[in-house]
Image (spheres, rainbow, N blue to C red):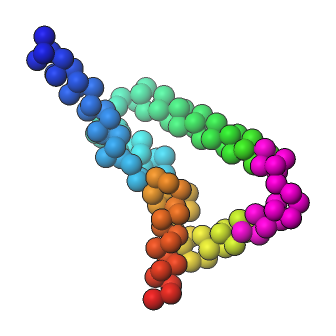
Amino acid sequence: MKKTFVALALAAMIPVAAYAAMEGQGARGDRLQRMTEVLNLDDSQQEQMKKMFDEHKAMRKAMREQMRARMDEILTPEQRAKRDELREQRGEHRSGHHGEHRGGHSNKRGGRHHQRGCDQQESS
């Protein structure tokens, strides 16, 4: 019984390990290609994964928009203006100095660590 449980646990970890190995891949296409290679996805599975990725992207976008609308209800006009200014500066930083990272995440936490690293490099 114990051996069966250990075997099942290890088998369940394979897709998780494969997905973890794919973390840091930029675009959805890279991730899908890597999953196809590692997990040997057939054409139907690839199409289902692509559809799932697209749906998830749309859900994330809708959630961001909803969160921003709620923030706007909470912030004062001055705070919103300052937030917008900071957002614009951040956008200039991304598109100017580090445009190659656009569309992917430099790390799991949305790039703050990466941005600090860039600031440190620029001041050196």
Count up the numbered dots.
Answer: 0
Say whether residue 26 is visible: no
User: Residue 70: x and y, percent?
Assistant: 78, 44
Residue at horizontal 49%, vertical 76%? Answer: 118
Q: Which residue is at 31% across, 46% downward?
A: 21
| 100 to the left or right of 44 | right
- Could you say where residue 36 lies in the image, as x and y percent from the top left? 35, 38
Answer yes or no: is residue 81 visible: yes
Task: List x then y, in percent, for residue 102.
Answer: 56, 62
Question: Magenta stretch mostly in which secondary structure?
Answer: helix
Magenta highlight range? 70-86
Q: Residue at x 48, y 67 (%)?
A: 114
Looking at the image, residue 111 lies above or below residue 43: below
Of residues 81 and 98, the one drawn nearer to the viewer in this rendering: 81
124, 14: nearer the viewer: 124
The quarter of the rendered structure image containing the C terminus is bottom left
Verify whether residue 110 appears in magenta: no
